[in-house]
Amino acid sequence: MKIKELSDLENGDIVTLRNGEKMIYCDEGFTDLSSPHYNSLSDTYDLNDDMTMEDRDEKDSDIMIVERPIKYEKVYDRKETIREMTVEEVSKELGYEVKIVKE
């Protein structure tokens, strides 16, 4: 789907502003991904339908590029493992003798 206007933005879209800053869109607001510098764009209320700033003195914050993550690649997956131990190893690990009992 092509982005044509402000209402086409979806949560997770990454926008690049005229000044090069990158922001992520979420629930009608933006979080700056580029730097800690002040950015005049904070929510969609600051924008016209064509994704330009209402206040033309702030035109550096016009949205120039919208990127939408389509496919996420898994980069981490925790694997739970069961560690097999003898009673002697458990005792050594705990620092005291243990006796295994059935409930």
Image: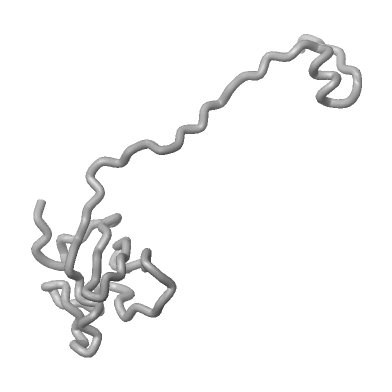
Residue 82 at x, y = what percent?
A: 62, 19
Position of residue 77 in the picture relative to residue 45 (left or right): right
Residue 3 at x, y = what percent?
A: 12, 59
Count of numbered badges drawn on the protein: 0
Depth check: 91 or 101 in front? 91
Q: Residue at x 25, y 77 (%)?
A: 61
Q: Quadrant of residue 45?
A: bottom left
Q: Residue at x 56, y 26 (%)?
A: 80
What sort of colour scheme is used for the picture?
one colour
Position of residue 78 in the picture relative to residue 70 (left or right): right
Depth check: 65 or 97 in front? 65
Depth check: 27 or 94 in front? 94
Looking at the image, the residue that sits furthest to the right is 96
Q: Quadrant of residue 40?
A: bottom left
Position of residue 28 in the picture relative to residue 79 (left or right): left
Look at the picture and state if 85 lies above or below 55. above
Q: Residue at x 16, y 72 (%)?
A: 51
Residue 52 at x, y = what percent?
A: 16, 77
Q: Residue at x 17, y 69 (%)?
A: 64
Residue 95 at x, y = what percent?
A: 88, 26
Look at the picture and state if 18 lies above or below 33. below
Looking at the image, the residue that sits furthest to the bottom is 57
Looking at the image, the residue that sits furthest to the front is 20
Q: Quadrant of the C terminus?
A: top right
Look at the picture and state if 10 lies above or below 31. above
Q: Quadrant of residue 44?
A: bottom left
